[in-house]
Image (cartoon, grey):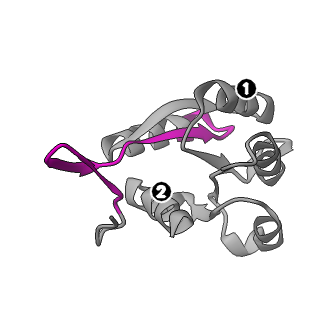
């Protein structure tokens, strides 16, 4: 069942509650990682871990099995769209990656469209509801 505010719901006995979403955040900026973690946890997203480079992200994804991985397009010298492809190859059944950046989507449109990611999220629009919206759209 999908609620108007893009929150996915699951029924347990007679109570309805938001479905738990387990998320891994990949970004090379420690301040952004801390801020994003705090924001998303406050909005009901469970942050199972963070990573700052591709190798760490691949390890953490394998061990933590998040429902979704938020990946910065620019990871220092590494490319987030390359990581999205590697995550899709490692978990071809359901990669569920959302690319994000502080820069405009138009700056990366060709890379984003060629990637297996669910889509692009400007960092300024990051919220629990936007993450839920991407996942709801992927299921629909």
Q: Which mark is residue 86?
A: none
**Residue 111, percent from left and from top:** 82, 65
Q: Residue at x 75, y 34 (%)?
A: 53
Task: Using the rendered view, name the quadrant where residue 21 is placed.
Answer: top left
- Per the rendered image, the range of residues in magenta is 7-32
Q: Earlier in the sequence, mark 1 or mark 2?
A: 1
Q: Which mark is residue 59?
A: 1
Is residue 58 rendered to the left or right of residue 29?
right
Q: Residue at x 37, y 42 (%)?
A: 20
| Residue 122 included in the magenta stretch of the image | no
Q: Which mark is residue 131?
A: 2
Is residue 119 rendered to the left or right of residue 58?
left
| Residue 18 included in the magenta stretch of the image | yes
Callout 1: few (<14), some (14-19), or many (20+) C-alpha neighbours within 10 Å?
A: few
Q: Are marks 1 and 2 in contact (CB under 8 Å)?
A: no
Q: Quadrant of the N terminus?
A: bottom left
**Helix, strand or loop at mark 1:** helix
Task: Using the rendered view, name the quadrant where residue 4 is placed.
Answer: bottom left
- Front residue (pair 31, 46): 46
Is residue 17 rendered to the left or right of residue 41?
left
Is residue 46 rendered to the left or right of residue 134?
left
Q: Residue at x 82, y 45 (%)?
A: 89
Looking at this view, name the residue that lies furthest to the front. 13
Callout 2: few (<14), some (14-19), or many (20+) C-alpha neighbours within 10 Å?
A: many
Q: Residue at x 46, y 38 (%)?
A: 37
């Amino acid at each position: 069942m999908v609620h108007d505010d893009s929150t996915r719901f699951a029924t347990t006995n007679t109570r309805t509650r938001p479905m738990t979403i387990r998320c891994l955040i990949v970004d090379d900026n420690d301040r952004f990682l801390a801020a994003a973690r705090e924001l998303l946890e406050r909005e009901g997203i469970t942050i199972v871990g963070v990573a700052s480079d591709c190798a760490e992200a691949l390890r953490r994804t394998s061990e933590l099995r998040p429902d979704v991985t938020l990946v910065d397009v620019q990871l220092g010298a590494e490319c987030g769209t390359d990581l999205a492809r590697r995550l899709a190859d490692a978990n071809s059944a359901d990669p569920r990656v959302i690319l994000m950046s502080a820069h405009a989507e138009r700056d990366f449109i060709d890379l984003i469209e060629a990637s297996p990611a669910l889509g692009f999220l400007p960092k300024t629009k990051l919220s629990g509801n936007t993450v839920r919206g991407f996942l709801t759209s992927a299921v629909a």
